[in-house]
Amino acid sequence: MITCCRAGLLTLAISVLGSSNPVAVQFDPRAAVWHVRTTTHFDIYYAQPVDLDSVAREAERAYARVSRDQRRQLSRKVPLILLPTTRDLPRTEQEAAVIVLASGAARDLDHLLLAVEPREGRENRMAHELTHIFGFEQRAARPATPSPVHRSAFRNGT
């Protein structure tokens, strides 16, 4: 499971387990001591350095794949917040806000929240969520254009 958070904390969660049963969170992000590892395209926030090198490599490969497909780069580094397992991912916007705030990640950016476990499929999940972040940035950069209905209304003077 991976979560992508908009700056306004719009949360998109995709579960690889398919379970909707609430499970008690065992990791307390507020009590954790957070660290940051910087790569070319990510600021990786983590409290436990488990599998950190692999996550960093996978994140960069996922970024390269999406960037190549989109034929562009993001304007800023992506905050990637690592959580121990899928049980520790947020279920609500409020939980996501607590994690982002506790980690020290910039609050005005789009975030990727990633469960380190399970490892299988992690790079593909990151690529999927990065596609959303590329899309968010592209839509934000486009100037607003009136829809055809609005354009015709302007021509008719209404």
Image (cartoon, rainbow, N blue to C red):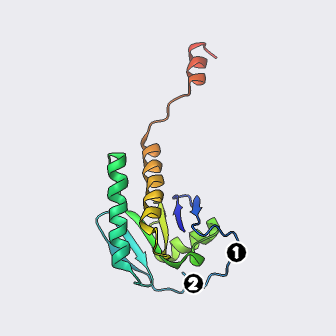
Q: Residue furthest right?
A: 21
**Badge 2, how many Cα within 10 Å: few under 14, some, many 20+?**
few
Using the numbered discs, state the Cα–Cα distance from disc 1 to disc 2 in whole angstroms: 16 Å
> Which dot, 1 or 2, sits closer to the camera?
1
Compared with residue 152, is residue 123 higher up or lower down, i.e. above or below?
below
The picture places residue 19, in percent across and down from the top left corner, at 66, 70
Who comes first in sequence, dot 1 or dot 2? Answer: 1
Residue drawn at x 37%, y 79% as measured from the top left = 52
The picture places residue 97, in percent across and down from the top left corner, at 57, 69
Picture quadrant where residue 106 is located: bottom left
Can you identify the residue that label 1 sits on?
22
Mark number displayed over residue 28: 2
Compared with residue 71, is residue 118 higher up or lower down, i.e. above or below?
below
Amino acid at the residue labelled 2: Asp
Residue drawn at x 34%, y 55% as measured from the top left = 65
The picture places residue 135, in percent across and down from the top left corner, at 46, 48
In depth, the one of 158 and 38 nearer the eye is: 38
The picture places residue 43, in percent across and down from the top left corner, at 37, 69
Q: Is residue 74 visible?
A: no
Residue drawn at x 52%, y 58% as measured from the top left = 6
Q: Residue furthest top?
A: 156
**Quadrant (top left, top right, bottom left, bottom right) of the C terminus:** top right
In depth, the one of 100 and 68 nearer the eye is: 68
Badge 1 marks a residue whose secondary structure is loop
Mark number displayed over residue 99: none
**Quadrant (top left, top right, bottom left, bottom right) of the N terminus:** bottom right
Amino acid at the residue labelled 1: Pro
Q: Residue furthest front?
A: 120
Picture quadrant where residue 150 is located: top right
Badge 2 marks a residue whose secondary structure is loop
